[in-house]
Image (tube, grey):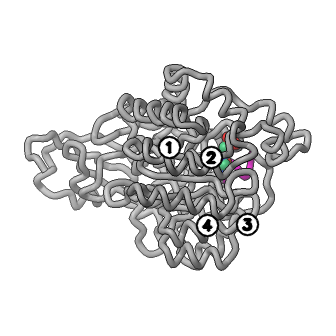
Amino acid sequence: MSLDLPIHVYANFTVATMVPRGSDSLGLIPAGAVVVQGNRIEWVGALSDLPLDYRTAERLEGRGRVLTPGLIDCHTHLVFGGQRIEDWRKRLEGVSYQEIARAGGGILSTVRATREASAEALYEAAADRLKRMLAGGVTTIEIKTGYGLDLENELKQLQVIQRLARQSPANVIPTLLAAHAVPPEYRERPGDYVDLVCNEIIPAAAPHCVAVDAFCESIAFDLAQTERVLRTGLEYGKQIKLHAEQLSRLGGARLAARLGAVSVDHLEYLDEAGVRELAAAGTVAVLLPGAYYFLRETQRPPVDQLRAHGVPLAVATDFNPGSSPLGSLLLAANMAATLFGLTPGEALQGITIEAARALQLDSSLGSLQSGKRADLVCWDCTHPLELIYGIGAYPNAAVIKDGRLVAGQLS
Ligand code: NIG
Ligand code: FE
């Protein structure tokens, strides 16, 4: 801590610290204060307990408004070319996601559009999406590749993600998802594509990504192929995570948990044995209700079992053009409560502290505690659950990243 950095006191806010206390899952402090020095949180508590040292510091008056940690979207595919309106129209007429994928549409149609797009065009489109998400309170976002599916285009996507990380105030976490689908040129020999991923793409991408992900599913990669990809990710020192049990039960979540995955994501078809393995491994379950909703799925993830076994539950948008063109993390949280049965408090934890855990960033992000990064959102409302309760109707947000106002207004 450097003593000459300016100190700001956020005073008289309804502070949702997201540090649970007993039955209070939000860790609420009604007339609360948060002291920020530079880019760090120095002190959090009731305004009446504010230490003398801070009483003369510059104050930002909350007048009862809500203050939360910056929101964290721990699973997105934000960088892509084109859109998938045609897929959506077909699905509304009864064609399934899997049928569209097997006919060469689905993910592969976005691969065609992404390969054709310049890095500049991909950047412009993704930067616009990111700017809107930041204005909605998202200060940390994970972004996956997975629409390049060859060395050149996976690296092109990673470069775009890294440019977003440099140019946006948001904290951007890059994940390599080269094992998202078998590209058309390897259609008859998927094993050769897995070789390419393990022997060339992961080694080249490793310096530019934090994690390696894969899609374990009948329309993507089987268990053995998934295991090779994840083990290679580990060899290169990367975190691993997995799209698992979304459309069927292949056992990917158990495999990933055994390998030490930080998270497994989707999980609609997870069974209780799988839930136990996640609990034993401390792997976070990332729920993606946007994809469940948009694909009109009916199998819900086993939330009661996950909760009963103490598996941490995070929630994310899965923002992508095919299964979840969802740009609102607050709407994802609403859906996690309404469609999957999370309590509203769990849903808000899912997009803050539990999402931080899914990215292994919970020691520095996800809650309002002294020592953490000063990523805060001041919301123009008086109860934090108004954020989850609204459906596309959200209070204005003033977004503070590392102590600096980066979107909205603080007045
Ligand atoms: O998380 N499940 C696989 N991948 C994405 C969908 C990508 C796409 O359809 O373009 C998902 O839902
Ligand atoms: Fe996804």
Name the residue carrying label 1. 201
Residue 109 appears in view: yes
**Residue at the spot x=23%, y=41% of the render?**
59
Type of amino acid under label 3: Arg
Is the residue marked by circle 3 packed among few (<14), some (14-19), or many (20+) residues within 10 Å?
some
Asked if 227 appears above or below 401 in the picture, the reply is below
Disc 1 from disc 2: Cα separation: 10 Å
**Residue at the spot x=44%, y=55% of the render?**
359
Name the residue carrying label 2. 193
Q: Locate residue 197 relative to residue 40 in the image: left or right.
A: right
**Earlier-in-chain disc, 1 versus 4:** 1
**Mark 1 and 4 residues: CB-CB less than 8 Å, in contact?**
no
Disc 1 from disc 4: Cα separation: 23 Å
Name the residue carrying label 4. 253
Rendering quarter of residue 369 = bottom left
**Mark 1 and 2 residues: CB-CB less than 8 Å, in contact?**
no
Type of amino acid under label 2: Tyr
Mark in the foreground, 1 or 3: 1
Disc 3 from disc 4: Cα separation: 9 Å
Rendering quarter of residue 343 = bottom right
Observer-nearest of 320 and 193: 193
Does the beta carbon at disc 1 come under 8 Å from ligand 1?
no
Q: Position of residue 350 (x, y in %)?
A: 52, 58
Does the beta carbon at disc 4 come under 8 Å from ligand 1?
no
Q: Secondary structure at mark 2?
A: helix
Q: Locate residue 232 relative to residue 344 in the image: left or right.
A: left
Q: Locate residue 100 relative to residue 153 in the image: left or right.
A: right
Type of amino acid under label 1: Ile
Name the residue carrying label 3. 249
Type of amino acid under label 4: Ala
